[in-house]
Amino acid sequence: WPVCDVAVALQMDDDVVRAASIVMGWVAPTPYKAAASEQLLIGKTLDETSARAAAQAAVSAATPLPKNAYKVPVLETVVRRTLLATLA
């Protein structure tokens, strides 16, 4: 079983995010849309700083089950890395 997965779709205007969709899987009973992260990115340049802020926003309201708390920092890292991978 996967620990988590993340799907990201960005509409860019040069280096500025115009629209964002971030969906996380295996962290809730159904795929979870990271709406706060999406809003945080819109109008900003995607870089390490904005990706880290969006990743932190994605997990800020996490309430893991007792034996799943390890997923929170893993998910934060996967969100950040997936966002940065769109720049490659």
Image (cartoon, rainbow, N blue to C red):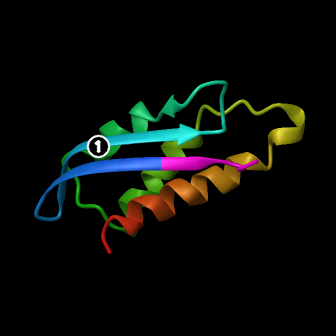
Which quadrant does the C terminus fall into? bottom left
Residue drawn 59% across the image and 25% down it: 30
Residue drawn 49% across the image and 42% down it: 57
Q: Is residue 15 left or right of residue 67?
A: left
Q: Which residue lies furthest to the bottom in this view?
A: 88
**Residue identified by numbered label 1:** 20
Residue drawn 51% across the image and 54% down it: 79
Q: Residue 42 lies in what quarter of the image? A: top left
When the figure is inspected, residue 52 is found, relative to residue 72, above or below; the finding is below
Q: In this view, does 71 lie to the left or right of 4?
A: right
Decide whether residue 2 is among the magenta residues.
Answer: yes
Decide whether residue 53 is among the magenta residues.
Answer: no
Per the picture, the main secondary structure of the magenta-coloured stretch is loop
Q: Is residue 39 left or right of residue 85?
A: left
How many other residues sit within 10 Å of disc 1, few (<14), some (14-19) or many (≥20)? some
Point out residue 20 in the picture as x, y percentages from the top left corner.
Answer: 29, 43
- Magenta-drawn segment: 1-6
Point out residue 38 in the picture as x, y percentages from the top left corner.
Answer: 35, 40
When the figure is inspected, residue 4 is found, relative to residue 67, above or below; the finding is below
